[in-house]
Image (cartoon, grey):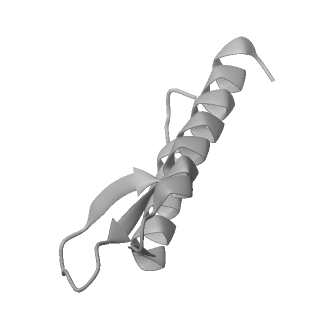
Amino acid sequence: MNRKQRACVVAGFFLLVLSLLFVPTHPYRSPLVRYSFLFTGQGSSIDFARLFAEWVLIALGQGGSSTC
């Protein structure tokens, strides 16, 4: 693995960690989505569908990038 490929893998891993630390949440009885730190949810429910979509887009972006 060359330097450019390694940088792409590290960037993808960094994006996955960030998306896991700052998860999309729905505040109580609200259709709006906001992003909050994972450990300070304060009664909000995690939007797992949006989180999964983020992971898929990150994987597609990293895997389908022709520059990596």
The answer to whether residue 60 is visible is: no
Where is residue 13, by image quadrant?
Answer: top right
Task: Judge from the rendering whether residue 17 lies leftward or rightward of residue 56; answer left or right.
Answer: right
Q: Image point 18% across, 72% down: which residue?
A: 32
Where is residue 8, by image quadrant?
Answer: top right
Q: Quadrant of the N terminus?
A: top right
Residue furthest right in the image: 1
Position of residue 31 measured from the top left corner of the image (x, y, whole percent) = 18, 81
Q: Image point 56% across, 55% down: which residue?
A: 39
Q: Image point 58% across, 47% down: which residue?
A: 16
- Compared to residue 16, the image places residue 7 above or below, namely above
Task: Judge from the rendering whether residue 43 lies leftward or rightward of residue 3; answer left or right.
Answer: left
Residue furthest front in the image: 42
Position of residue 18 measured from the top left corner of the image (x, y, whole percent) = 53, 42
Q: Foreground residue, 11 or 25? A: 25
Q: Image point 50% across, 27% down: which residue?
A: 67
The answer to whether residue 38 is visible is: yes
